[in-house]
Image: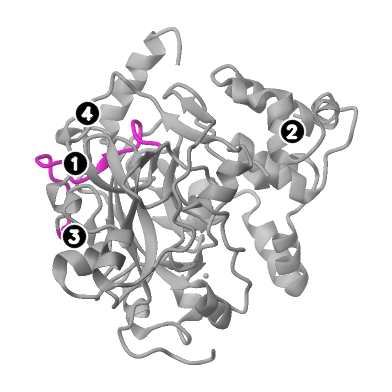
Amino acid sequence: MEFGEYVRQAREAHRAKDRAYSVRQVARRVGIEPAYLSKIERGEQPPPSEATIRRIAEDLKEDPDVLLALAGKVSADLREAICKRPQVFAALLRELKDAPDHAILRLVREVRDGNW
Amino acid sequence: MVTLEHDSLVFRFPSVHADARLAVNFRRTLRVPDDNREYPLPPGLGSFPLLHVDDYAERTPSAWSAHGGVFLPMYQAEALWIRFDRDDYPFAVKIAAGKIDAVTGGPWSPGLTAEPQDYLVTDKQPWLDGFCIAKGHVRQFVAMPLGEGFTAEEQLTGAAEHGGVQIVVYPMKAEVYEEAVAYRRMAPTIRMRMRWAVGSPVIGLAPGGLIRQKVYKDPHGISAWDLTQSSRCFVHILNSAQYRAVTGRMPPTEPLTAQAYTNAGLPWFDYYAADQAALAGSPKLASLDSVAAMGIKKGASPLTDNVPVNPGQVIRIRPDGSTVREGSF
C-alpha cells in the first residue's frame, strides 16, 4: 500500500468515530496545510519529511516506523545506528529477515525489572 | 515482557495471546491550578522521554540499579498523566506513586484486589491523571522533590523512600478475551559525572489540583484476569536539571502554564462515559494535603502561577471516539 493511501485510510477510520480527524483538524495538529495533507493522501505529493511523518503517526496513533517504511524512509536513529556499525547490523538484518516475529522479539531488549 | 519503544513502555504477553499488547505513555501536560476548584482534563503536550536506568547506571542513584526500569525528567511542580494505548485486548493495571496505590491509597502489594478495587481496566480507562480521591475526582500527579513532605508517599508513610511511579500489568485470560471478541464480532459495530548518595531517590508525585475524572469499576470481574501472568516496571523520576547532567540530553522545555494555555483559547477536555460505573475514591487519598495546602502549612510557596483559570473551551470525548486529547501549538 502507498503511504498516502495508508494515511487516508487510518485517518478515515478515526474520522468514522471522531470528527476531530477531518483533514483540516489533523493537518492543524500536525502543523501542515490541509491542502498539502490532502495531496499527500491522494498521492499527488511525495511523503513529507521524517519529522512530519512522526507527527502524523502520533496523531493517528500509528507506529512511526511503519509509516516511515511506507514512505521509503528509515528513521534517523536507525540510520545512525546502522552507519556506526554497518557490518554488524547488515549481517544481523540479513540473518533475521525471514525469522518469525516471535523469534525476533526474543532478541529485543527488555526493560529490566529489579527488586523493589 | 516489557520493552521501551518510542518513549512508551510496551507490555506484551505472547504466551497468553498474540493480541496481548499494551503501550503505556507518560504525557506532559499543564498543571491545573491547585485551588480546590475542579477542572476538566488538561491536554497532552507530548511524551516525556523515557530512558533505560541501566544505560546511566554510573550516574544515577545506586538504588535505581537495584530497581531496574526506566527514568524520565520532570521539572519541580510539573504534572503528568498516563495514557494506555491498546488494541482490543483488555488489561488490569495497577499504578502506584512512591509505592502508594493511586486508586486506593494503600501500600504497594502484588496481585489484584477486588474490594476495594486497587487497579484500573484499560478497556474502560484511557487515561489516569492523578490520585483517585473521590467518585469522579482525582488530584493531579504533580512532581515534587522527595524529602520535603509533599508527596503522597511521605504524607502516608512518613518516609521519603521510593519516589517514582510503579506499574504492574495483568492481561485478561485468553479464553475470556476470545469469548468477548467472538461476541463483538457478532455485533454489527465496533533515559555530573557523579553518583548520588546511596538510595537517594529524587522526585515523587504529590497530589495537586482537582480534576474531573472517574476511575471506572472493573466490569469484567477479577476472575477475568490472568493473575499467573504479569509484567511490571519501576519508572524513576529525575528533575530536569539533573537529567541533563546524567544523560547529556536536553530535557523538554518547561510546560505551558494553565493560564497561558487557557488565555490562548486552547481546549480542555471532558471524558464522558455515562453508562460506566465509577469507583468511590479513596478516603485515605482524599485526606492528603494538596501541594498548595501543604505549602500553606509549611509557610512555603511551592507553586508559581497557581492562579485560577476558567477553561472556556471544553471538548467532550466519548468512549467510542478516538480520544484525541492533545494540545495543538
Q: Quadrant of the C terminus of chain B?
A: top right
Q: Earlier in the sequence, mark 4 or mark 3?
A: 3
Q: Secondary structure at mark 2?
A: helix
Marks 4 and 2: which is nearer the front?
2
Disc 4 is attached to a residue of which chain?
B
Question: What numbered label is drawn on residue B108?
Answer: 3
Residue indicated by mark 4: B220
Q: Are marks 4 and 2 in contact (CB under 8 Å)?
A: no
Q: Are marks 2 and 1 in contact (CB under 8 Å)?
A: no
Q: Secondary structure at mark 3?
A: loop
- The residue segment tinted magenta is B107-126
Q: Depth check: B318 or A79 in front?
A: B318
Residue indicated by mark 1: B281
A57 sits left or right of A73 in the view: left
Disc 2 is attached to a residue of which chain?
A
Instruction: Name the amino acid type tagged 1.
Output: Gly
* Residue B19 drawn above or below residue B143: above
Disc 1 is attached to a residue of which chain?
B
- Mark count: 4
Q: Are marks 4 and 3 in contact (CB under 8 Å)?
A: no
At a point 54% along the width and 30% down the height, the residue shown is B313
A49 sits left or right of B27 in the view: right
Residue B45 can be seen, yes or no: no
* Residue A91 drawn above or below residue A47: below
Q: Residues within 10 Å of mark 2 (few under 14, many from 20)?
A: many
How far across and down, in percent of the image, does residue B4 sit? 50, 58
How far across and down, in percent of the image, does residue B9 sit? 45, 54
Instruction: Name the amino acid type tagged 4.
Output: His
CA gap, disc 3 to disc 1? 17 Å
At a point 23% along the width and 31% down the height, the residue shown is B278
Tag 3 and tag 1 share a subunit = yes
